[in-house]
Image (spheres, rainbow, N blue to C red):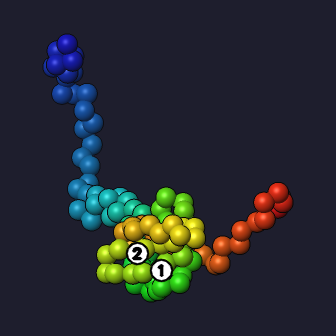
Amino acid sequence: MLLTILAQVSPSATPTTASKPTNALVSLLPLIVIFGLFYAFMIRPQRQRQRKQMALLQELSVGDEVQTTAGMFGSIVQLSDEFAWVELAPGLTVKMLRRAVIGKTGPVEEAEPGTTE
């Protein structure tokens, strides 16, 4: 049905004025601007976060208080190239991937039972 409607359109319906040929750069300019904005707002910040996380993982040391991707807090008791052993509670040590550590924290202060903060 759409083809029959398009076939019925007469060629005289098109504008008779000759349009100027557009420069290739002008027609590509919107794409270049969109890519620039995409890079500035999405790619660059992600790369900065990745570099910051890699630097954090490289500077980990035994005794650091850390937070994991699972939301657990603990202190590092042993490190290898790929793994970190994190003590979550006295006597409870968990072996996890080093990249599961998302940040360093200060010493975890435990509240006394029965008190509110």
Q: Find residue 115 and report its image quarter.
A: bottom right
Q: Nearer the viewer, mark 2 or mark 1?
A: 1
What residue do we see at 44% from left, 67% from top?
Answer: 94
Q: Quadrant of the N terminus?
A: top left
Looking at this view, is 77 or 66 the one in front?
Answer: 77
In the image, is residue 111 above or below residue 3? below
Label 2 close to label 1 by CB (< 8 Å)? no
Res. 85 in view: yes
Question: Which circle marks residue 113 in the picture?
Answer: none
Looking at this view, is 60 or 94 the one in front?
Answer: 94
Neighbour tally class for label 2: few under 14, some 14-19, many 20 plus, Cα within 10 Å: many
What residue do we see at 54% from left, 82% from top?
Answer: 64
Element at badge 1? strand
Report the label total.
2
Element at badge 2? strand
Residue 72 placement (x, y as % from top left): 54, 62
Which callout, 2 or 1, points at the residue further toward the start of the chain? 1
**What amino acid is labelled 2 in the image?**
Ala
Q: Find residue 55 and report its image quarter.
A: bottom left
Question: Which circle marks residue 84 in the picture?
Answer: 2
Neighbour tally class for label 1: few under 14, some 14-19, many 20 plus, Cα within 10 Å: some
Q: Which residue is mark 1?
A: 77
Looking at this view, is 100 or 91 the one in front?
Answer: 91
